[in-house]
Image (spheres, rainbow, N blue to C red):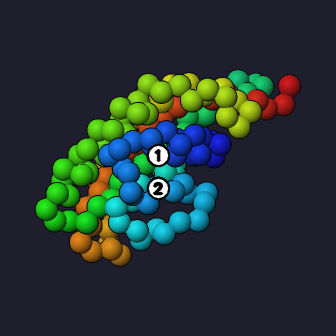
Amino acid sequence: MIALLDPIKTRLQLLPAVSGWALFTAAEEGDRKAVPRAAIGFSSARVVGVRTTAAQVEPSLAITLVVKRGTGAAAALEAAMGAVIEQLHNWFPGEHGGRSWEPMRLAQITDPDFESEEGLIGLTLAFTTQALYPGQP
C-alpha cells in the first residue's frame, strides 16, 4: 500500500490546479502546516476477501487538500478537487510494491479536522484500490 504513495504524488504533480502547492506523502518529510497543501496518505484499509493462501486488501488512499479561507478559496479548492478526481478515478496504478493494483475508485469525500489550524478550509478525497497479498501455501 505504501508503494502507491509516490506514484500518486507523481500524477498529482502534473496538475496545474495544484501548481505551487506543498505536495507530500505520509512517508516523507514536509511542512504539514504549509498552505495551500495536498497531503497524500491513508485513511484505512480493509480485507475484502480471504483464501487459505492469500488475502485481497483494499486500502483507502486519502488526498487532503487545504487552502486558507478567503476570496478565491472555494474556487481553488473546487479546481483542485476536480483535477484530482479526474487524474485518479479509474486510473490503473499497475505494479507497485511487488503486486498488481486494480483501478482506483473515488470512495468518499470528507471535511478534514482543522481544530489546531484556524482559518483553513479543505476536504479529503478517499480512493480505493485492491491487490492480492499472498500468505503461506
> Residue 40's spot in the image, x, y percent?
49, 51
| Residue that appears at 51% across and 51% down | 41
Query: On screen, 24 above or below 79?
Result: below
| Residue that appears at 67% across and 28% down | 95
Does any portion of residue 23 appear in the rendered image?
yes
In the rendered structure, the answer to whether residue 99 lies left or right of residue 115 reads: right
| Residue that appears at 13% across and 62% down | 71
In the rendered structure, the answer to whether residue 16 lies left or right of residue 132 reads: left
Residue corresponding to mark 2: 23
Query: On screen, 41 above or below 92?
Result: below
Q: Which mark is residue 13?
A: 1
The three-letter code of the residue at mark 1 reads Gln
> Residue 113's spot in the image, x, y percent?
34, 64
Q: Are marks 2 and 1 in contact (CB under 8 Å)?
A: yes
| Residue that appears at 23% across and 46% down | 78
Quarter of the image for the C terminus: give it: top right
The extreme right residue here reads 137
> Residue 74's spot in the image, x, y percent?
18, 53
Q: Report, in whole angstroms, how far the alpha carbon at label 2 lies from the one at label 1.
A: 8 Å
Judging depth in this view, the residue of 109 and 122 nearest the camera is 122
Quadrant for residue 133, please give it: top right
> Residue 85's spot in the image, x, y percent?
35, 35
Judging depth in this view, the residue of 10 and 8 nearest the camera is 10
First along the sequence among labels 2 and 1: 1
